[in-house]
Amino acid sequence: MPRGNIKYLLSGILILTLFLTVVPSTQSSQIAIVEIDTYNSSDFVSKNILFDESHCQNGSAVWAPGNASMFSWLLGEHGYSSFTNFNQSLDSGILSGFDILVIFFPQIALTAGELAAVEGFVSNGGGLLLAGISYGNLWGFTNNYLDDISTTFGIRCNYDVINSEATTFVDHNVTYEVTSWYPKLDTMGGCSLNVTGSAESVIKLDDKNMTVVNDYGLGRVVVSGSSGPFIFYRYESITYGDSHMQFSLNVIDWLAGNPERSFNVPEIAKITVGHGPSLSPAEVEEYSLFVGQYHDHTTHSDGQSTPEDMLDSGLLRGMDFMVMTDHAHKNPTPIEGVTGGQAMKAIAEAYNLDIHIVVGTELSSIAHTTGFPLTENIWTDDQQEGVDEIHAQGGMATFSHPGISPNYGEVMDAFESYGFDAVEVI
């Protein structure tokens, strides 16, 4: 399709072009204390997974994987179906439709009825995955409400901070082909776990329990001392990405009673969010995948390259489009905001270059918000005004890097009331 007739399909499909990380062979300690269940591949049964976000607060939803996450995408590639609970009570009614429940460090306490329902869910054959967070983290997140759930199964989060790689693994389905496990999660880390009763530790850092499993009634429970291994697969995963993917798949496979297997995912993660626009198959075929760059800066703000060099770089890499979003602050300046993109667009049009330049900005005196396409600068330190001014120019307001700072959590919680059109997914 000619680039001059580009159609923008603003549907619910996010395409994340990320590169697989090669994990070097690392020496690990394998301690066999439990007998591994063995299965045939023909025994695999697809299961429904419920990610709970109804107990998120103060930005914790930013770190809670749902059905539109890399974790969910990984599971979908291996035969599972994921759903997210945003506002329903975790009672036996909603839980009856699912096989596995996932809760990441809840910041709203579960009611006595919900706690009883979760215990009954596991006792009757359900799988439960819980993940904790480091003590005293900058975001103010706590494990107190997670402990309300986990102590029923003989597991409790300790008040500590763990940021070091664990390489001691018990021989278990959950540790199948896992070579490293890294608890760091951006500005947060993990916590160690206290174990009592029949619960057993399968991943350790020295004498600290980092991942614990338990067969409870007819069901199974996994508690991880960190959310990091379920989030950092490629971006900022250093050399742990592949091992984290394997670990994540192992956890769900074991909770589901499914066979051990090696993970296998495509290079491009295609994540579907909602149903998208109502298009016929013929209309869908009219759309093509375009490769480009979004949210970047030039020397018109804090970028390292001039608009000319950025444009040249995009052409050399064969990009179809570039969305340039230099920073703009509350006080007007001659060169900032839209000026970098405008300079690139002027060159591209003057020389009829085969690349589509979208002029935008990143409003940076508020919780960072990108707007595009724009025709003129916006100077403001008011969050609502920033979103409204972007819309006034016919642009799309996107909330930038929501996990960068604790104060961004409040804005994320008010995402809909501000009127944002999108949020960045990394």
Image: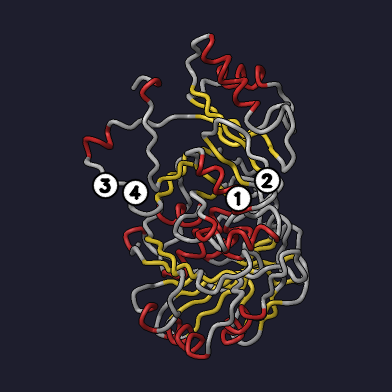
The location of residue 148, given as percent across then percent down, is 60, 84
At label 1, counting other C-alpha atoms closer than 10 Å, the crowd grade (few under 14, some 14-19, many 20 or more) is some
Q: Is mark 4 on a helix, strand or loop?
A: loop
Mark 4 vs mark 2: give the one in front.
2
Residue at the disc numbered 2? 380
Q: What element carries label 1?
A: helix
Q: Is residue 232 above or below residue 160?
A: above
Earlier along the polypeptide chain: callout 2 or callout 1?
2
**Residue at 66% of width from left, 52% of height from top?**
382
Please name the amino acid that badge 1 sits on: Glu
362 displayed left or right of 71: right
Please name the amino acid that badge 4 sits on: Gly
Q: In which quarter of the image is residue 196?
A: bottom right
Q: In which quarter of the image is residue 390?
A: top right
| Residues tagged 2 and 1 counted as in contact (Cβ below 8 A) | yes
**Residue at 53% of width from left, 9% of height from top?**
351
Q: Nearer the viewer, residue 57 or 104?
A: 57
Earlier along the polypeptide chain: callout 4 or callout 2?
4
362 displayed left or right of 216: right
Earlier along the polypeptide chain: callout 3 or callout 2?
3
What mark, if any, has residue 276 been given in the picture? 4
Q: Is mark 2 on a helix, strand or loop?
A: loop
Earlier along the polypeptide chain: callout 4 or callout 1?
4
Q: Is mark 3 on a helix, strand or loop?
A: loop
Mark 3 vs mark 2: give the one in front.
2
26 displayed left or right of 280: right
Residue at the disc numbered 3? 278
Q: Residue at the far top: name it.
A: 351
